[in-house]
Amino acid sequence: MPIKNGSEYIESLRNRNLQVYLFGELVKEPVDHPMIRPSINAVAATYDIAIEDPEIGSAKSTLTGTQVNRFLHIAQSSEDLVNQNKMQRKLGQKTGTCFQRCVGMDALNSLYSTTFEIDKKYNTQYHTRLLEFIKKIQYENLVIGGTMTDVKGDRSLSPSQQEDPDMFVHIVRRDEKGVYIRGAKAHQTGCINSHWLIVMPTMRLRPEDKDYAIVGAIPVDAKGITYIYGRQSCDTRSMEDGDLDTGNSQFSGQEALIIFDNVFIPNDLIFMDGEVEFASMLVERFTCYHRRSYVCKTGLGDVLIGAAAAIAEYNGVSNASHIKDKLIEMTHLNETIFAAGIASSHQAYKTPSGNFINDDMLANVCKHNVTRFPYEIGRLAQDIAGGLMVTMPSEKDFRGAVTGPLLDKYLKGRKGVSTEDRVRILRLIENMTLGRNAVGYLTESMHGAGSPQAQRIQIARQMQLEYKKKLARRLARIPEGENTTDSTLIAESSDYFDRIFGLKKEKQNNA
Amino acid sequence: MPIKNGSEYIESLRNRNLQVYLFGELVKEPVDHPMIRPSINAVAATYDIAIEDPEIGSAKSTLTGTQVNRFLHIAQSSEDLVNQNKMQRKLGQKTGTCFQRCVGMDALNSLYSTTFEIDKKYNTQYHTRLLEFIKKIQYENLVIGGTMTDVKGDRSLSPSQQEDPDMFVHIVRRDEKGVYIRGAKAHQTGCINSHWLIVMPTMRLRPEDKDYAIVGAIPVDAKGITYIYGRQSCDTRSMEDGDLDTGNSQFSGQEALIIFDNVFIPNDLIFMDGEVEFASMLVERFTCYHRRSYVCKTGLGDVLIGAAAAIAEYNGVSNASHIKDKLIEMTHLNETIFAAGIASSHQAYKTPSGNFINDDMLANVCKHNVTRFPYEIGRLAQDIAGGLMVTMPSEKDFRGAVTGPLLDKYLKGRKGVSTEDRVRILRLIENMTLGRNAVGYLTESMHGAGSPQAQRIQIARQMQLEYKKKLARRLARIPEGENTTDSTLIAESSDYFDRIFGLKKEKQNNA
Amino acid sequence: MPIKNGSEYIESLRNRNLQVYLFGELVKEPVDHPMIRPSINAVAATYDIAIEDPEIGSAKSTLTGTQVNRFLHIAQSSEDLVNQNKMQRKLGQKTGTCFQRCVGMDALNSLYSTTFEIDKKYNTQYHTRLLEFIKKIQYENLVIGGTMTDVKGDRSLSPSQQEDPDMFVHIVRRDEKGVYIRGAKAHQTGCINSHWLIVMPTMRLRPEDKDYAIVGAIPVDAKGITYIYGRQSCDTRSMEDGDLDTGNSQFSGQEALIIFDNVFIPNDLIFMDGEVEFASMLVERFTCYHRRSYVCKTGLGDVLIGAAAAIAEYNGVSNASHIKDKLIEMTHLNETIFAAGIASSHQAYKTPSGNFINDDMLANVCKHNVTRFPYEIGRLAQDIAGGLMVTMPSEKDFRGAVTGPLLDKYLKGRKGVSTEDRVRILRLIENMTLGRNAVGYLTESMHGAGSPQAQRIQIARQMQLEYKKKLARRLARIPEGENTTDSTLIAESSDYFDRIFGLKKEKQNNA
Amino acid sequence: MPIKNGSEYIESLRNRNLQVYLFGELVKEPVDHPMIRPSINAVAATYDIAIEDPEIGSAKSTLTGTQVNRFLHIAQSSEDLVNQNKMQRKLGQKTGTCFQRCVGMDALNSLYSTTFEIDKKYNTQYHTRLLEFIKKIQYENLVIGGTMTDVKGDRSLSPSQQEDPDMFVHIVRRDEKGVYIRGAKAHQTGCINSHWLIVMPTMRLRPEDKDYAIVGAIPVDAKGITYIYGRQSCDTRSMEDGDLDTGNSQFSGQEALIIFDNVFIPNDLIFMDGEVEFASMLVERFTCYHRRSYVCKTGLGDVLIGAAAAIAEYNGVSNASHIKDKLIEMTHLNETIFAAGIASSHQAYKTPSGNFINDDMLANVCKHNVTRFPYEIGRLAQDIAGGLMVTMPSEKDFRGAVTGPLLDKYLKGRKGVSTEDRVRILRLIENMTLGRNAVGYLTESMHGAGSPQAQRIQIARQMQLEYKKKLARRLARIPEGENTTDSTLIAESSDYFDRIFGLKKEKQNNA
């Protein structure tokens, strides 16, 4: 029976007997844990949007012919990718946090084309298996967690060179029914809130790393998996009474460490096994989709801009020219991020497997701006908020018999604005710039889908300096061939400009 | 006979007997003037691209059914607008300067929909007249200059309030055949290189400004027009011997002041006459198209990045990590501009007249980044170039009997690189950051299509703070209606989010 | 008996029976409260530095002739002010937080010169009283809290215009022994850790605001005072077991709301009473000293740079060029702040009372950079730290029987680095960029001593545009007097350039 | 007979028969060349300031006991260095350009201490010789040009490894009277306007580079020297009629290439000869002084801010909040540069020779900001100026019989402002952001005294990461010695913090 909406989704998570540790203890039922629940609510919103806003939140599956949640859809066009971005922004607006479901969406899409190309080369069955798996989850309407980032150990060594072989997830045993893996995946967004995990390698592999080239689907409650919950700034406020001090009491993100100890993957859920040369293709396609998925942060930006505008109004300064100017700047930066996401999706092209992938240069440009602008937007929000945001007392003081009336008297703002409403907005700004959702809005914006330097490397690979040098030499009237690298001999590592300037069609035909 | 290519275009400009003043004197034949010619070459490139790269440089006209230069095409889809951006970048790459033809393209497209709406309201014939005019110029393949910016006088007064009524172009006389206008238009890009000028008002008008609400087409060589050529940094280097010191000897921009003194516009070339309330619609649609047209600067950015990479190579430092990092940063900024242009075009929608207009918020975001990033890209190019760019001697010294050999000996860089090639690239960087094309790459990027503050005002108009405040209040759990402006009563001045989140179709149907 | 060191200071705070509310309840003994104690430790460090580093931490009082804590010293020279900056940086380095004692130091120094000038005009005794008070606290070696920021109510109204007269602290009753005040002061740094409070008006007053022009000293445990403790990000981590998750378990800042209800000030402790026109002098001098005191944040910056360098070393990436480059950038920004503080102190001049005051323009420039650069330094620290900073589990998980060994195995970094040490540094970075001390390093850097706009207004007042326009006109060869404001008639509101260019001596002689 | 003032200085330059090439031809008399003269005027201003403003422009020489021009003075205190900065800013304000005399001042001061230390080690007579030389030039009041930057050839090779040995200036012959040198020095600021050149090595040398370790004084008109004049943006406008289009007709900078061919230096003017290990000391001390000397650019910044304020006034927009805000930002950035210079000078300390040297870290921070902020100040000036700056016609058009009246009519701004005054200010802004003095204000700010990366390297050397890591580990409670480099074993390469925290005195005593 497919899950129909957010509430059914939440129910579907109960009684799974997961091994989730938090503060050193096993969590009885994550669904009911006050510190975990807000992250579940955020995922639930991804179900509800498919109903409330079907054009954005769902799509017609070419595999099943039915309308499915867009997070489970294989992109058939540029427009499909653009719509992912729009859905991401909308959900960011609704939850003010990380709703945790993009990794799975981007993993499915990158696996779709990669398995096709493995099969083509090796005559394997990965693509067919994957199609079956996707059909099933589309039908049941499940949450997929894509798990990629290994803990890595000594970063100067490859997987098989590590002193401890478990620093990267790898196959430790095989039998006729499947394989058994061991290792750990760090920073796993929303994993506990998922139904299935797709394990994937995290980087380019070498021939000797064969056992690390494993991709497969695993139920979240599979035997041998331990989850250790990540702390977040101000996380325990969710466990205090009241809802005021959390700032955003309903929604939060979720990060955990997953430890796999002899976890089984049956053959029909294995989508790569030893084809090391395809690991980098998978990783690159995944990061290409995923760096553009950070458009979600513009939805959070919208909330933060709204909060800053609201507190300015409550403080009676919304007409000050410097306040207006800061709101404009925040908007400008936020839309600059959005634009790069949309442009990347617009410039998508068809892969040999038939699905679409967005432009990689612009995806990296999008994500790279995400590592900068939310910090500046956050700084400006704190500027507008005023110092009270970090000096005001706790909710208990606002409710206290002695302190309540004093605070009510003295922390009043503009006439007609209740002290509590003012506090609520200030706590929301704190939540997004210092507190629990600052983790998602700031630090995850920095490191998710690769740290800034990863984007710079990827931009470097595609910046086509030989092409640009040629433009410069031509205008400077330097004869071709003179003291320059012969550009006809150079295979530029990117076809960014080919695609911009309309040569993409031929390329595809040849592909 | 239609103009077929760049050379024919150049010939078409001869013998027009224009009143062009430069250095206080009448220019005999602009085509042959060494300081003017590079700007003509840049326009010629807009003809050649239609032949060399028809997919980008031309389009099938729905008016004539034939393939026409894209600069004369009325956009029929988002893709048409995206292709404008691609053509703009490509021409920027080819010329390293302003090729002067976007104003006309954007003027035609904004007039197309505005005349349609005037006719609908007033039952006038402007749209039909305009279609005839467009068909003609598409057939003859002519250059259209859009002239908008009045000299404005005292900026605190409206046109009809000015002490001198000529501070804005206006009708001074009428007869049964047409109208006569007087006034001046400043910063007129490429006007002398055009065949026709389209005169348009420059801002919102009031009922009493009726005579200023005039739009019409005028041949460039019409009686009563005087052109005064604008100076540019290092302009006279084009008049020195040799081609080295100019940096880019072939291409430059062109700006002039146009003075109209009793210039006649016949009735069938009048496209607005007195409908003051449509002036702001025309201006806003024009700036919407045009701010996104500044994507052309990414083509110039490509040249400058290429020049910086080339000089780094010549200096033997292209592997230094800080050099690579600066090239990456330049690329990142350049592509961030490009992305906003593409996104704006992608988010285009159909006007009631049937043509397409790009998204205004993203167009403003695009242009606003153009007022910042080229300066930073230029700064980084100067960083990579080294100080020699501004201390090296003139071409005459390089050719001099005494000085030539000394310079050749002492200004050598890395082995195998000729001193002259090194100098050529340095002069190109100087050209784009201090010299003649810095006017286009920097100052015009700042002020063209409206100064930074104009974009901020436009972003402010569309930033939908009420919508965003509502998002914040909902997450902060502030009950609706509590100490807030009732958002149901507020007609947000923008439908940006409506269009993002897919409600645009209905809106259009209602339009 | 004078307090000799940090431990004695801590003991001196016991048994004062303060009315401190935290989480809605009265705190029994703040000294023993785990959430409050770290802020007391930070103040204790200001005692210890006077012993460990007497040249920086103490000075010879001209009032008593003995060596006193520098925080209680009246500045006698530029060098004294420079040494304040050096002490501030050093204490920032030692505590990584706000040590809360600068407000008192800056209050004493600004009162010193202001009372002198009131007495001169009104023949009052404020200065003499203040000298007695200072001698006493210098002898007893006490902590002074300067309380300035009123809660302000409706910001568009003056104190006496407020609906509720208590929105600004004011005299509610007088008798022959002294006055009684009512009102509240917000964001009171370190107030509970002080021995005396000096109440001061917060802004320019008007004749009708006479009762608000009150300055006086009050013991922290005076009858009628209520303190409500401010929440900080992650504050309750100090109340959990262990010391790991706090990041900096020893030190923190302190902000509280103080409510005065009929609090008595005896006549000999009143330093201003009704001289409304001196309120702005006092406020301006205080902010002048205090904006430069934000040099303390460079000490915190040193800690954060050190933490970033340490985690880079632990992660084995300290030789990556982009890591080194980020550490350089952080240092550059940090030293840029420091430089402005030192320059402001260097450019100090003598007030009529004989003490020294630093340059106001440069103090504002210093503070304005403090509202920007710590955010960028923090962003770069998060970049270097990696995502683990916000996804790693709690200390209890690290100590847990099941989870401890798993975490130890999987979160290892470079060989030879213990997982715990890595976690400790990451938690310190979290502490300073999201957690408890981010309040001091970021948000207080933004709003303390006036929000950014306050500095911009003050910079505007001193930027001497008439002088600069004259420079420009002279070089442009525009004849004096031509279409310009006659600069001889303009009394520039600042003598910044006079002091730079050596005219200060004469001015002082005339003063 | 000493030179008394600017006019006498100008006369002193006549009839020297220098071999100066410009546009491939020998210049008859540089003093009378319209393109060269403005640079001479700028140097003349350094004479006049000593008379008009003796406290800033002159100092009492400890060598001669008389008042000498401060550019020739050996700094005896921090205050002397601070006063250099003030003089630099003032001259920047007066000339709006590079006045070319700091290199000599900084060369004398760095040679002063370096020769002292060479003599101490080798028992040579360099310091005594230098004292005689300084006394003489102080008495005669001459201009010293310090020539350091060699042309360098292949940057990956040391001087003696170059294919062509002349890529660095070196001794080619010796006789009993002295030595003969060959080579070339690039980017030589003000060399033709000097009386003496001091040749110095440009970088760290190795034992085999002995012949390159030569320092000596040479008269500017010595036999064997050829000067080739550097081009600047818009330089030939100085050769057109009128004074309007230059923007700043009186003042400019000067850069030339100097070629030495067998130029003789007599023994008593040799200040280093073969002591290779002192080359880096000399270079480092010189750059330490010189990077702080870039405070001069704040004087240019004052002019540009004034010009921007003036044009805003002429355009009638000086009250717009965004205009005011931009002027504040320009001021803030300008004063941030100034502060770092003053702080560096304030933190000066005594060298073993007895003169004072400023702090190196802060000098690098100062210069590094100079490579950024003038570009942003320039960008904001262009923003305020408006597009007319780059589109207005030439002076000849303004004077033309036909065009003059038209321009006067149409380019009028606010009532009461003459068109010419408006044009003059716009041309000044053009001059400083694109034109002749943009070379000094922008590109020279970038590359003079070392390119940005040179400052970053120097900041890196002094940032004392071990010290800072220790601060972090202590707060994070990581036991000393645990997985850290033992900091007691590390000799930090800098004593920056020692000097800040008051240990400098002991160090000096030990020195």
Image (cartoon, coloured by chain):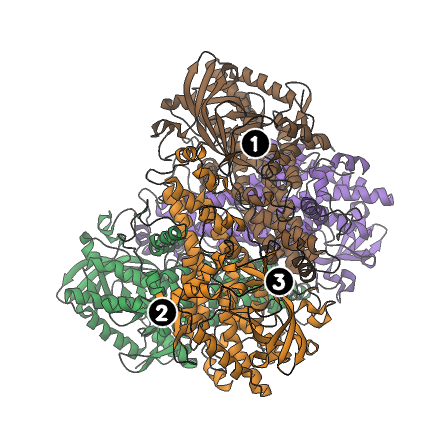
Chain colours: A orange, B green, C brown, D purple
Q: Cβ–Cβ below 8 Å for labels 1 and 2?
A: no
Q: Which residue is mark 3?
A: B323
Nearer to the camera, A373 or D195: A373
Say which of marks 1 and 2 sits in front. Answer: 1
Snapshot quadrant of residue A6: bottom left
Q: Chain of mark 3?
A: B
Are the numbered discs 1 and 2 placed on the same chain, yes or no? no
CA separation, marks 1 and 2? 57 Å
Does A276 sit left or right of B374 as displayed?
A: right
Q: Is D96 above or below relative to B176?
A: above
Q: Which residue is mark 1?
A: C28
Residue B86: % across, % down: 43, 72
Does C267 sit left or right of B70 as displayed?
A: right
Name which residue type carries label 2: Pro
Going by the picture, which residue comes out furthest to the left?
Answer: B176
Residue C2: % across, % down: 67, 22
How busy is the neighbourhood of tag 3: few (under 14 within 10 Å), some, or many (20 plus)?
some
Q: Is C485 above or below relative to B447?
A: above
Q: Which residue is mark 2?
A: A54
Q: Work out which quarter of the rendered image holds the N terminus of chain A and state it.
A: bottom left
Snapshot quadrant of residue C67: top right
Mark 1 secondary-structure assignment: loop
